[in-house]
Amino acid sequence: MVEKGAPGLKASVIGGKTAKRAVWQADITLDGVRVPAANRLAGATGFGATAKVLTATRAGVAWEAAGHAMASLAKMNNAAKARQMVADARDLLGGNGILLENHVARHQADMEAVYTYEGTDAMQSLIIGREITGHSAFSAA
């Protein structure tokens, strides 16, 4: 373990992240830092110790990715169903469907907003495709 304030240690919290903002990640620079033998982690003899931690956390990371894909599928499906439902209600009411007193047009406008935020069907499809294939269809430009 490198103790705080050790000569040659620079550490600062990485800011300006768009995701995982609750997790404090550090930008760490080690320049000529000396670590006393007493500060070594017991049983850690090389990168193998780090690899064991990574192996243990991979399942959790996989479930997190699956969760994000499910959240995208659920949003895409539910928004599409709700849009169709208010379109059907508007159709059933005919001209009365645009009157504020019947609330259909208000719900229709609300569903257009829901459909748009966090990504339209096209955007959700691109996100899901990237999660499944590991390849992004988004333009790099």
Image: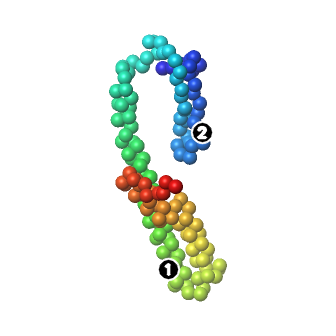
Residue 21 badge: none
Dot 2 surroundings within 10 Å: few (below 14), some, or many (20 or more)? few
Residue 63 spot, x, y in % from top left? 39, 47
Which color scheme did the rendering employ for the protein?
rainbow
**Looking at the image, residue 43 lies above or below residue 97:** above
Residue that protrudes farthest toward the top in the picture: 37
Tell me the residue at 50%/80% (across/down): 88
Query: As shown in the figure, which amino acid type bears the numbered disc 2?
Result: Gly
Q: Residue 41 is drawn in which quadrant?
A: top left
Residue 85 spot, x, y in % from top left? 49, 75
- Whether residue 77 sits left or right of residue 106 in the image: it is left
Tell me the residue at 47%/12% (across/down): 36
Q: Is label 2 in a helix, a strand or a loop? A: loop
Q: Find disc 1 in the rendering and name its residue.
A: 88
Q: Find disc 2 in the rendering and name its residue.
A: 15
- Whether residue 66 sits left or right of residue 13 in the image: it is left
Query: As shown in the figure, which amino acid type bears the numbered disc 1?
Result: Asp
In primary-sequence order, the first of circles 1 and 2 is 2
